[in-house]
Image (tube, rainbow, N blue to C red):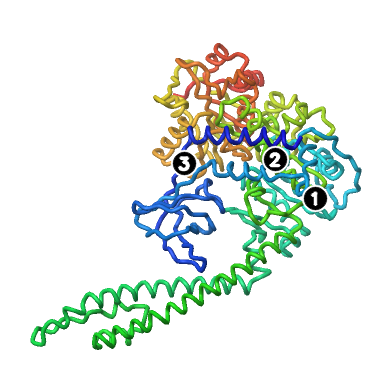
Amino acid sequence: MLVRFVTAFRRGIRGEMEAMRQRLGPFEVMLGTGEASSEPDGTTRYEVALPTHSDKLIVGAECTLRSGGREVVVTVEALIAGMVTLRGERAIELGTRTILVFYPWFLYEKLDRALECLSPQTFYVERALSLFGKGEPQHSPQTLSLDHSALNESQRAAVQLCSDNSLAFLWGPPGTGKTRTLGHVVRELLAQGKRLLLVSTTNSAVDQGLSQIANADEGRAAIERGLVVRLGRTKADSHGAALHEVMGRLHEGRTDALRALRRRHREVGAMLRRLLKAQERLQQKAPAQQTSLFAEPEPPALRPTDLEGVFTQARSRRLCRAAHETLAATLKLRAARLQRVAALCKDSIARHEAVLRSDEGTVVGQARAILTTLTGAYFNQLLEGQRFDVVVAEEASMAILPSLFYAACLARDKTIMVGDPRQLPPIVHSEDPQVRRTMGRSIFEVTVPQPQASPHVVMLDTQYRMHPRIGELVSDLFYNGRLRHGEGTETRAAIAGRAPYPGEPLIVVDTAGTSRCKSRRGSGSRYNDQSAELCVQLALEGAQAGAASVAVITPYADQARDIRSRLRRAGADHRIECSTVHRFQGHERDLVIFDTVDAAPMRPGVLLNDARSGTTARNLINVSLSRARGKLIVVSDVAYFERNAPQSAVTAALRGMLTANSPRVPLPG
């Protein structure tokens, strides 16, 4: 059974890698100024400014560093405070234009190798097979250790299921408190003495899970003691759980000493480079100074500035006036001394690094909860050999199946999948049916295709995000009317009360045949100038009326780029964001403007009218509509969709809005 699964997964991974090579190619990340220094093990460390944040870069990734027409393969060692630290086998000089080239299929290569190493002797393969429906999950009722009375009924039921079952699915529709419930699940399992690994497809979801742990007294205490460790890079508050923070608390002396040694090694290296240049210049000047006894005296071979940092200023001035032989001998003596210091620094750094690596392994090994991205489960070397009682996968419905299979093999007792099968599935570039079967389906679809009827699933049924009228639309369209609406509607009503269209939470702006959909040559994307300009006007009006956050969401990357360009020209501030749907999954905004883009003379695009499966488009529409807290505006040509795609998800959404007596307004002006 294991061989069959692994073989299918590896075939799917390789097919997806090939599609990524053909369709995406490598990504380039521009770097700023930096410096290179030789390391004790003979490699070169590069510390370079990273002017713009890039999600493509992760610690441990292999990239190509290009500068001045030369390149070297490097590994990303650290990403901290706008700087990237790289290590390569050889040195190249960093020029004014330095580029880091990243190959996005690199992580799939790592996953492929990780799957190849799976075996029943060293992994809990039966847990992974159970996750995929090849085995009956165990049910063992437990008395909860903590008080969860602050949760609603469905949330408490989810905590109980995760405590009782060896396999549990926590189904969290938008705004139902999924992350809060997950925090209670994690704290409950920790209180029961379980050791767990929490993974997710994105860093932001990992950060949100960590925040929920840190919200409780027992969670903060565990973090302080180093029992909760966050692996990987994050821009968010790590609450003291990041590995470097834990190491700083538990091994402060050693980390400070290593930092000081590295600083000293860089200083000595800079002094040596300056000294070598001075020696070279002195050697070039020597013959000219001895040509004639009667020639005009030449200026000194070196200036005091040539020796800056190598000697004191006073000694530099004296040396520059000294005889050539005296100066040369002094420089040779100082170079030998600095080389000895550099060698001692290298040896000390190597010893400290070896001990720190061991210390890091000890910290990770003693932690009761490890949080990282799903890729970190098979990519981070610190997790090699680590096993857990429980593996929890947040955003599991977006995760590719092979990575979930590997993560589940790390769980001794239970696996918990957290997500929403009605939202976006994994992104797959290949069109090959076998690849899409193994990489493009969600774990909910595979194991619990009818989640509402499965004993392994609890659906959170009370939403607190959306205005009740928006929530009812989403509930009726995507959750069979099962979503209820929580208290605290005042804030959402206040958002709906503002412009545009004051007092209305749901609005359809009908372009009614006045817009045109186009595509650029060679592009599979689409754009619509008229709807783009309309979305910009509505977003600016919403921000001016006091919306704290505005999202313009569109299915097409070309349209998103066009709208962002128009927003920049209009002077829009940071409150207004525009992107494709995937960018906003897991987020919420006061005002959401959804631009469907499609219009004559083109037929409806596959993103909004997926006739092949009937699921992707529906999930896309769900995510687009359910991001809104207080006001949702859909910009669309209503008759166009009724005529060309009467069974599509977007047409159903438009009908639902109009049936709910939402205003159907013409174009402004």
What is the CA distance from the residue labelled 1 to the residue labelled 2? 16 Å
Q: CA distance from mark 1 to mark 3?
A: 38 Å
Task: Return the x and y of residue 501 as percentages of the image width and height.
Answer: 55, 29
Q: Amino acid at mark 1?
A: Asp
- Sequence-earlier tag: 2 or 3: 3
Amino acid carrying label 3: it is Pro
Q: Earlier in the sequence, mark 1 or mark 2?
A: 1
Quadrant of the image containing the N terminus: top right
Answer whether residue 72 is visible to the viewer in this image: yes
Q: Quadrant of residue 426?
A: top right
In the image, which disc is placed on residue 476?
none
Of residues 535 and 489, the one drawn nearer to the viewer in this rendering: 535
Label 1 or label 3, whichever comes before in sequence order:
3
Look at the numbered disc 1 and give the secondary structure of its residue.
strand
- The structure residue drawn at horizontal position 89% and vertical position 40%, both measured from the top left corner, is 139
| Disc 2: which residue | 404
Residue placed farthest to the left in the image? 294
Q: Is residue 646 above or below residue 266?
A: above
Q: Badges 2 and 3: C-beta atoms under 8 Å apart?
A: no
> Which residue is pictured at 46% across the width and 66% down the height?
38
Q: Residue at x 71, y 24 (%)?
A: 476
Q: CA distance from mark 2 to mark 3?
A: 26 Å
Q: Is residue 274 above or below residue 492?
A: below
Tell me the tag on residue 26: 3
The residue beneath circle 1 is 389
Residue 101, how many percent across, how many down?
Answer: 45, 47
- Residue at the location (64% across, 60% down)? 243
Q: Position of residue 15 (x, y in %)?
A: 57, 32
How many neighbours does mark 3 have within 10 angstroms: few (below 14), some (14-19), or many (20 or more)?
Answer: some
Q: Secondary structure at mark 2?
A: helix
